[in-house]
Amino acid sequence: MKPTLAFVGVGRMGANMARRLKEQGYAVTAVYDRHTPSAQELATEIGAKACPELAAVTAAADIIFTVVTDDAAQRAVFAASDSLLAGAAGKTFVNCATISPAVHVEIEAAAARAGAHSLEACMASSIPQARNGTLYLMCGGHRAVFDTLRPVLTELSDAGKLLRYIGPAGTAGQVKALVNMVMNINTAGLAEGLGLGAALGLDPAMLLEVFAQTGANSRVVATDGQDMINRDHACYFSAAHAAKDSGIALSLGTEKGLSLPLAAATKAQYDRLVTLGLGLIDKSGIAELTFPGRAGTSGK
Amino acid sequence: MKPTLAFVGVGRMGANMARRLKEQGYAVTAVYDRHTPSAQELATEIGAKACPELAAVTAAADIIFTVVTDDAAQRAVFAASDSLLAGAAGKTFVNCATISPAVHVEIEAAAARAGAHSLEACMASSIPQARNGTLYLMCGGHRAVFDTLRPVLTELSDAGKLLRYIGPAGTAGQVKALVNMVMNINTAGLAEGLGLGAALGLDPAMLLEVFAQTGANSRVVATDGQDMINRDHACYFSAAHAAKDSGIALSLGTEKGLSLPLAAATKAQYDRLVTLGLGLIDKSGIAELTFPGRAGTSGK
């Protein structure tokens, strides 16, 4: 019999993962969100119980996915007076947030003290992939915990083709931070190239096509280039999240005494977007800082 | 009958273009290089004349390719007392160097005053592509000049599949500067990601593979990633050239009043490599500044 599942944090990522797993025949018994209406709405849709308390979530399922926003939110659900760890013996937590790697290590230790298991499962994909079960999933923790969870994680990761075991707790978060750091740098660089091209009066469609055919090519040329030109910044991955993730990587660099000027310049740009009140637009919105005549520029 | 060809500047790019076109049935009648032995060696190999004077090059061919290093070298061959423009009426110049776009405009005007034609043909590829005739060629100048040159340019650009007419003189150079600016940013960012991964003790092969499979992917992941890990910086495109090209783009940005912090941080890194005496290693050598314990870092 399949294990029962619960979800803590049902924003667009968490809700889509729950929908996908329900579709694949899993019972999603309980959902929780700080924003109560989100939990109630999803619960109604998929036939789960919207729990007002975290302890009830743990009681209701074998495997509890947490898909929260940041370090503070991740710590809160495991450490508050109402905690997922209450009565957690034998339960397994799968933590999907992009948070500081050290927090994954903390949570694994806290879960172990409660007789529970913990795995970090970092997602290097976005909302449609959550819905379709084609997430790139990088996992960190004990190998045996990963092996136990493999069937359910397989349903989220294109039949397991995009599922990777990275190493001990924290290592998947490190890799995720590096992926996002490099992606954000490429995004910031693309925005500068397209912005300068626009200032020079070059045809943006031609320029984007040349970038795609030359050494300037990158994944973000395909995912963000047209949106930068069209100013279509509907949010898949927010500027505020980009700032947070680049910040995690920069902190790791500081711990290791490494100078990372590109990562620092990129974080400064995303911080500037947040300061301009644009933190909730998509990461492609960094182009608002580099195209002449847009919000964040003073180009002539 | 095919036009006769000459080459000015026969470093590895120019020499390989000459070899390729000779193979395709063109007579390469004359070659010239500031470094006389390079010209003599190639002349012997392909049955051309090594000219000690530029005027003799123009006299010897219908189409003269210039493949020189920078703005000063480009201006010198057209403006020195011994100049390619002497007796140039009816000749056509194809200028392949990555130089400031404004210099292409200057040369086109000077050629016109001498009764000659000029086309900029900027190459977004490297040495093997020159040898195999698979260069990505972006052309700027009068459309009629481009059309006349199409047969010979086709032999250099994968049967013309990689041949593009961009616009008036200077525009191809602008696009080339933007391509290299973005490529250099991606390269500098990749070096930071892999360097921080190494500092964290992550398996570099795993990390590179994850980059290639996620939003961190870029052309330079494939072309430079393994070289960064292996410290294999045999030169295809030198750090000094990267510094120069990022500088061209930054100057264009300054003219337009745009702030380009990623491009600036990247140029500063390449300038630092040059200062460390590493300007002649490949652009992948920027990893020497970001991996712990290497030349340019003080990581612990």
Image (tube, coloured by chain):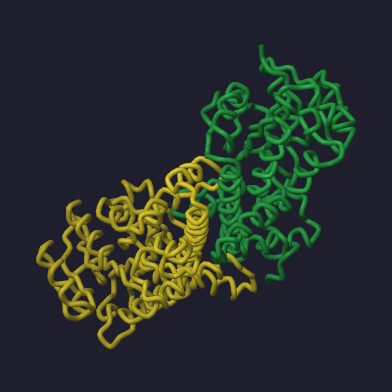
Chain colours: A yellow, B green
- B201 left or right, relative to A34: right
Q: Residue at x 23, y 68 (%)?
A: A10
Q: Residue furthest top?
A: B1
Q: Residue at x 33, y 82 (%)?
A: A76
* Residue at the extreme bottom: A81
Q: Is residue A72 left or right of residue B246?
A: left
* Residue A17 image point, x, y percent: 25, 59
Q: Nearer the viewer, residue A70 or A209?
A: A209
On the question of residue A225 being in view, the answer is yes
Q: Give left or right: position of A51 versus A193.
A: left
Residue A280 versus residue B256 in the image, above or below: below
Q: Nearer the viewer, residue A6 or A98?
A: A98
Q: Is residue B172 above or below residue A23?
A: above
The x and y percentages for residue B59 are 81, 24
Q: Please report the residue visible at 50 percent of the width from the left and 40 percent of the height from the top.
A: A213
Image quarter in which the N terminus of chain A is found: bottom left
Q: Nearer the viewer, residue A40 or B10?
A: B10
Q: Position of residue A100 (x, y in %)?
A: 45, 73
**x and y percent of residue B180 in the render?**
60, 49
User: What is the quadrant of residue A126 in the picture?
Assistant: bottom left
Marks counted in the figure total 0
Picture quadrant of residue A120: bottom left
A95 sits left or right of B199 in the view? left
| Residue A167 seen by the camera | no
Name the foreground residue: B71 vs B236: B71
Identify which residue is drawn at 79% across, 20% down: B29
